[in-house]
Amino acid sequence: MSIIAKDKSGTDYPQVPTGVHKARCVRVIDLGTQRQDYQGDISWKRQVLLIWEVPEYMNENKEPLTLSKFYNLSLHEKSNLAKDLTSWRGKAFTQTERDGFDITKLLSQPCMLNVIEGSNGRPKISNVMKMKEGDSIIDQCGNSLIFNIDEYQKGKTEVFNQLSEGIRNIILKSQELQHQDINDIGTSDMNSDDQVPF
């Protein structure tokens, strides 16, 4: 009897195809201040990860596929976050909003995602847009989740433990957590509507 080893790197997983799709933001994740290296120029920038479910496409467990996008936490007019949120909202930010906009307001909000093929062949969000007037999307399937690194530093680890291992590893590399003893934070299981009213 044979035991055959195979290269599983080519295994196909269901993916959202290219095109424009209805979606809903289901996770807003504060990644903390992350190290960035651009051609040897090192900088540290606060980053967030937004995750959307795309109910038109399901995985083998009949759950909506998801797409995500990393952003620097900045509303400078040239920032990707400001561009996507302006397109999503259908209006520019006021100066008051630019001085302090709570991105947790994005949670559970519907939108349209323009999906393209990334350089690695996987789907990539090129931009986020407002849904058409009168258009609708089916009810949210997954649970909403907000992760705030400040809360985690205060010992509130429940939400952190619900994140995937890959995302937790990114957060643990943040400037905020690099020099903090994990025992100071708490335990971790690392082993283991049509309008956008915001």
Image (spheres, helix red, strand yellow):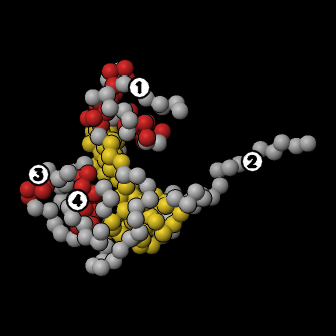
Q: Where is residue 195 in the image (x, y as percent from the top left)?
A: 25, 70
User: Disc 3 to disc 4, how far (Cα)?
Assistant: 12 Å
Q: Which kind of residue does numbered mark 2 sit on?
A: Lys
Q: Can residue 92 be seen in this view?
A: yes
* Viewer-side label of 3, 2: 3
- Circle 4 Cα neighbour tier, 10 Å, few/some/many (<14 / 14–19 / ≥20): many
Q: What is the secondary structure assignment of the residue under circle 3?
A: loop
User: Disc 3 to disc 1, how far (Cα)?
Assistant: 35 Å
91 sits to left or right of 47: left
Q: Position of residue 108 (x, y in %)?
A: 32, 59
Q: Which residue is nearer to you in this view: 9 or 106?
A: 106
- Please identify the quadrant where the N terminus is shown: top right
Q: How many labels does the image show?
A: 4
User: Disc 4 to disc 2, how far (Cα)?
Assistant: 45 Å
Q: Which residue is nearer to you in this view: 40 or 48?
A: 48
Of callouts 1 and 2, which one flags the residue occurring earlier in the amino acid sequence?
2
Res. 82 mark: 4
Task: State if disc 2 and disc 4 touch (CB < 8 Å).
Answer: no
Of callouts 3 and 1, which one flags the residue occurring earlier in the amino acid sequence?
3
Q: Which kind of residue does numbered mark 3 sit on?
A: Asp
Task: State if disc 4 and disc 3 touch (CB < 8 Å).
Answer: no
